[in-house]
Amino acid sequence: MAATGFGELKIFSGSAHPELAKDIAEFLGVKPGQARLRRFPDTEVSFQIDENIRGTDVFVIQPTCAPVDEHLMELMIMIDAFRRSSAARITAVLPYYGYARQDRKDKPRVPISAKLVANVLSAAGAHRVLTMDLHKAQIQGFFDIPTDHLFAAPVIVDYLARLDAKNLTMVAPDAGGAERARAYAKRLGGELAVIDKRRSEDGTAEVMNVIGDVQGRTCIIQDDIVDTAGTITKAAIALKNNGAARVLACAVHGVLSGPAIERIEKSPIDKMIVTDTIPQTRALAASSKIQVLSVARLLGQAIKSIHEETSVSSLFV
């Protein structure tokens, strides 16, 4: 790829998701950057760049997935190395932004960790950030450097459209996800339903009420993150109890921690669709229900637009 005002394009990867970085580099027609990322016996990070990057446009691919703190520290150290090696511009590419769920003070005396991570990325030397489907869109405002916020919707909607499901209803697993589910429903020509989750009067059980018509319909539960899969599997049971003919689920970020995969396997969910913003090797090996979609092309197109100083907005449609 031709050099622009920020020099030659370079793609580097931490240890979080080298496969995604390789796919992005392949899409862009560039070779992955040469570097050595190791750990000392006491687990301290050792990083060395094995090529000249002076005056280049560097993109560091590193979702801050589990182990979150290790991958975050790796990213900081890599950014510092690129800054000290005179890269013209450093873009931190975080397909999954860890700590995004800690975006406000919802209890007394707690941190706003999403803001802290934004500060540390800037302090390390990142010039801009590229991320995908933040838990809350206003996290963009936590950054004092340019931030491009992509959405995986085009990839997921394209896959769902090819399923050619009849009588489709998009389902938000809680009231907060209604806007996102509505956007998917509009693009797929489906209806919208919302799960109203509340405690029973004695506080011992969770009651899941379905708002909307799901009788005899194909229901797709849509969320941004599926972590332990507790909410999404309970929602699936509630939909089946209300007469849904078929239940699928989709989420951008498949964290799938703890009992998540086991819960999905035992649930009425026919298929769980996630993207590869987080590596899904374990999930694919453990469950036949999980379908992984690649966002490498979408991220690659965004990187190309940033490098060439052209609009990223066209990727939002």
Image: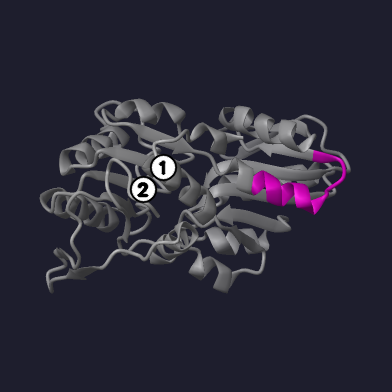
* Residue at x 46% of width, y 63% of height: 26
Q: Residues within 10 Å of mark 2 (few under 14, many from 20)?
A: many
* Residue at x 13% of width, y 74% of height: 41
Which label was assigned to residue 131? 1
Query: In the rendered image, is residue 278 in sight?
Result: yes
Give SS at disc 1: strand
Residue 254, compared with residue 119, is above or below; it is below
Q: Earlier in the sequence, mark 2 or mark 1?
A: 2
Query: In the rendered image, is residue 234 in sight?
Result: no
**Residue on which disc 2 sits:** 93
Name the main secondary structure of what is drawn in magenta: helix
Left or right? Give the position of 227 relative to 236.
Answer: left
Q: Amino acid at mark 1?
A: Thr
Q: CA distance from mark 2 to mark 1?
A: 6 Å
In this view, the residue in front, 4 or 135, is 4
Q: Which x, y percent locates residue 30?
A: 39, 62
Q: Quadrant of the C terminus?
A: top right
